[in-house]
Image (cartoon, rainbow, N blue to C red):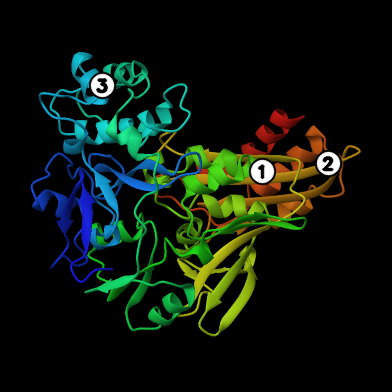
Amino acid sequence: MEEQPQVIVNCAARSLAGVQPPTTALDWLRSVGLTGAKEGCAEGECGACSVLVARPGLEAPTEWTAINACLVPAAALAGQEVVTAEGLGTPDALHPVQQEMAVRGGSQCGYCTPGFVCSMAAEYYRPRRVEFDEHALSGNLCRCTGYRPILEAAEALGVPAAGDHLSLRTTSPPPVVTPGRLPGFARPATLAEALALLGEPGAVPLAGSTDLGVEANLRGARPGLLVAIDHLAELRGVTQGPTHVEIGAALSLTEVERRLEGAVPLLDAVFPQFASRLIRNGATIGGNLGTGSPIGDLPPALLALDATLVLVSAGGRRTVPLADYFTGYRATVLEPGELIAAVRLPLPLASMTAFHKIAKRRYDDISSVAIAIAVDVTDGVVARAAIGLGGVAATPVRATEAEAALVGLPWTADVVASAAAVLARAGTPIDDHRASADYRRAMLGTSLVKFFEETR
């Protein structure tokens, strides 16, 4: 990293000198006059702060990726390339996305519009796009216009014109992110260097910042040192061998989804229900597990997949079954200075799987209950059953008693009904603002019956 770290914003270099955590990318961009992006919620739920970042792509050297600027520290963008709504077009030469939003009445008060425009632009430039994926807007909220004209604008978009400079930009690689250190922030070159830095007092790992950013914005968290691990090659691999699938902990969920290419159907069921595309573009498996939250969406699925975690520290490497990883409310076996390096899923995978998320909204919401089920049936008899639960105890849990009520018995409605009654007693659900304990128990009981009806 240079002595005067910079970010390329709308094709112009801007210095980060004097900017230090907890200054977010949003606050920094607004401080230099780029006020299109707004703060609506400060926790990644409304998308008013959306901007584009140039990232390495799978189908093109560069892909424009929309992220929540309200969550990411400005320092984490050092050496990278960013485009805001101001960089897409001008009042005299609107970008195609801006043009369609204007002529179809997609903007009223305009507060959310720049965020919508950036999320739409990321989808507009998606390689090999045939139709507009409406899920690209799942993290953007509009409070006054209504979504019909916005969706009409999205669906009216064609393909980028020849010579479109942002489209041409995707044909060459993004800037190489170089290591370096700023006040309160460090980007190590290797995993070994990262582990050494994490041994410093107050140091915490930083990847997508979708949880850490909320802690900083809403709860005033101020870590002593942010150690960026999101670009470390040692944490970004996906391998599929004869005995297991291994997923690097620092890959974003969008990257995991695309790299697995449907190899793990249960995770494919989780991803569309995990927050929003904006969040999945930043959030990582390692981060989701590292928080130790009892209501994360991934832990139930990974428990049902019988996952094992690879943990690394300056002292070495160890593996821990995910079922043994959680020790209490937001407490885990992770030791100071230790990182989740990868998640391993044993093969073969169960032949029948499902993920049921019960929440107040279909998308972009925290689950009241999450149930992941993986079952193998051989000659009409349950050979294997694994059920992971979230939102019903202080930690994500395996429903081992319900599993035992299935294994070795016929896969019939009567057996499933008996096991469902056992499942309804799993965990220690409580009454809170998301759901009552009785409701949670009812959802547990019906989930297995629903799974049976879906799969028989």
Does dot 2 land on a helix, a strand or a loop?
Answer: strand
Q: Which residue bears the numbered disc 3?
A: 146
Identified by mark 1, the residue type is Ala
Q: How many C-alpha atoms fall within 10 Å of the one at disc 3: few (<14), some, or many (≥20)?
A: some
Identified by mark 3, the residue type is Gly
Residue 54 location (% of width, % of height): 34, 46
Residue furthest right in the image: 379
Q: Nearer the viewer, residue 430 or 153?
A: 153
Image quadrant where residue 101 sits: top left
Identity of the residue drawn at 17% across and 42% down: 38
Identity of the residue drawn at 36% across and 28% down: 124
Q: Earlier in the sequence, mark 2 or mark 1?
A: 1
Identity of the residue drawn at 82% across and 50% down: 407
Q: Which residue bears the numbered disc 2?
A: 377
Residue 14 location (% of width, % of height): 15, 55
Does dot 3 land on a helix, a strand or a loop?
Answer: loop
Q: Earlier in the sequence, mark 3 or mark 2?
A: 3
Left or right relative to 55: residue 14: left
Left or right relative to 179: residue 110: left
Q: Earlier in the sequence, mark 1 or mark 3?
A: 3
Quadrant location of the C terminus?
Answer: top right
Residue 383 location (% of width, % of height): 84, 48
Does dot 1 land on a helix, a strand or a loop?
Answer: loop
Camera sees residue 417: yes
Distance Cα–Cα, label 3 vs label 2: 47 Å
Q: Nearer the viewer, residue 49 or 368?
A: 49
Image quadrant where residue 302 sits: bottom right
